[in-house]
Amino acid sequence: MSMTEPIDLPEGYYLDNFLQLVSTVGERYSDLLDPTDQAFLAQFRQLSTTAARLLVRLYIRKGPVFRVNRLAYPDVGAIGPAVAELIEAGLLDPAPDLTAAQIVRLLTLADLKHWPWNPDPRLSKAALLDHAARIPDLGSPDYWHITEPLVARCHDAALRRLQLMYFGNGRQSLTDFVLSDLGVFRYERYPLGRAQRWFQEPADINQTLQLMDLREQYYQAIETKSDESLPALADACLAITWRPRVQERAFRLMNQLGFRLEQSGDWTRAMTLFGTNDAPPARERRCRLLYKLEHYTACWEALQPVLDAPQDASEARFGLRFQPRLARKLKRPVLRVLAPTVAEYRVEWHPAAAMSVEQLACSHLNDAVWLENQLPLAIFTLVHWSWWFADVPGAFHHPFQSGPADIYQPDFLQRRGTDRLHLYQTLTRQTARQHLEQNIREKTGLQNPFFGWSGGLDTSVLLRCFDAVPWPHWVAIFQHLWLDLKRHRSGFPDLFQFLPGGYRFIEIKGPGDRLQDNQRDWLGVFNEHGIPAEVWYVDYATPGDNTPADDAVS
């Protein structure tokens, strides 16, 4: 079926999706469900189909309060009986306590003009919201003189827990079912069962929910520029002993908080946050703070582990740049690093309307394609597809994952029975080519960790590029990607050019552009392994200049 062909979803599809969610959670997490979860599931299973459909419809909407006379769904039919059944079951509250701000958000501006609490019917909705935010009262609809029926969802906390158990994160929701049903996203099939579940202890679920709340407070503070709330938020994070299942996500938030507090001058609290973990950029920030505090000897000691065993590309780059500055303070030997030799050229071309500098370069070059990061990532992903989607406990816990949950863990390959050294002792060029062809045939359009199929990726060009590059060069490229899958996935040269008996990568830089750190990293890898790569700096010929374009290096 064409991706642009509309798909008619069956009536009640959203209820089917919700039933799949609660059924899966019930099967996998029966031992971790708390009494509230169990009570909700028991109540939900007793509902009629129409009431269940209405409740799921309300769960999908923003809510949590709704105007009953504004609810209308053809597949539900009469709303009144369904609402009455949900109220009787304790799943909807007919008299929720509301703030004035909630009332203003719920009603239209026309309705609000006649609302007794409105001080001036001429006020805009935004002005009314400002006014309502200053009213501390909390009351039922009757208290606010609302005569029409309102209802509020009663079990949002249970739903949140169930969704978290199903997805393992707070980002995904019932919307992911719909996107899959519509064919917008298609996923690889992999084994799912009780052994694959993400959470093993109730405390992991509760602490993840706690972290989600803290993270939401952090983003709200950043969005509203409420920096004064960050110290209390940091203290709340520091007061928790984070469980192993939650630590990685918690440390990420604490490092974000630490950076913000460092920028605002709260160095003591920032250092405490960075001291909780070694996940990048914690070690770098500790070094920088010690330097600012002029604790140079302590800074030197903190820097050595970064120099000896950097955890990612950013740490490696920081260590090499920071060491000379610190060494001069302590009168120690400065670490000298030779920059890689890079072939650089400067050309002048006439600009073309509606054409990027990369497209312009392709128009001046014979047999060149603009693939940028998509080239190595697509080949890397397709060649190693079986490793991404291997049946490893805990890697996949719901059907809407583009890749395994442990993809960025340092023991990713070890958990799959290999490592970077041994992998390419058994994976040959011939086998890699077979993987590439087979996965292009069978996996096209499926979600994956590193590249998208949209944008007209020409798989025949992909195969031709693979064939043009010697296998040792591909292995060097793959090895660099494995070193830091997060950061090395960008910075690859823009163009690939086929040459008689060979090839070359070309990084194109338009006027005023310069090489970025990740691009220099890749050029260093190419230089080390004899991979042909060049940097071209493009200047645009001025209007009226009739000098022929410089194609000398094409």
Image: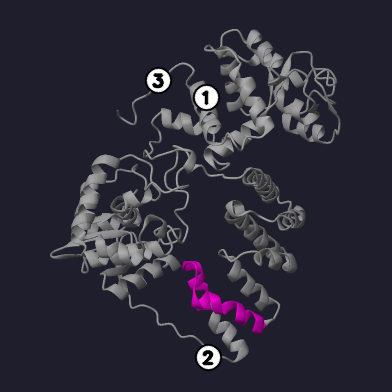
Q: Position of residue 358 (x, y in %)?
A: 32, 56
Is-magenta flag for residue 330?
Answer: no
Q: Is residue 526 above or below residue 441?
A: below
Rendered-image quadrant of the C terminus: bottom left
According to the image, label 3 marks what residue? 8
Q: Position of residue 94 (x, y in %)?
A: 75, 17
Q: Quadrant of residue 168?
A: top right
* Disc number placed over residue 436 in the picture, else none: none
Mark 2 neighbour class, 10 Å CA radius: few under 14, some 14 to 19, many 20 or more? few
Rendered-image quadrant of the N terminus: top left
Is-magenta flag for residue 301?
Answer: yes
According to the image, label 1 marks what residue? 19
For the residue marked with disc 2, what is the amino acid? Pro
On the question of residue 394 being in view, the answer is: yes
Mark 1 neighbour class, 10 Å CA radius: few under 14, some 14 to 19, many 20 or more? some
Instruction: Say whether residue 266 is left or right of residue 367.
Output: right
On the question of residue 513 being in view, the answer is: no
Q: Position of residue 305 (x, y in %)?
A: 55, 76
Q: Please give the name of the residue rendered at 26% of the width and 73% of the height, measured from the top-left corner.
A: 530
Question: What kind of element bears circle 3?
Answer: loop
According to the image, label 2 marks what residue? 333
- Callout in the foreground (1, 3): 1
Q: How many marks?
A: 3
Q: Is residue 528 above or below residue 98?
A: below
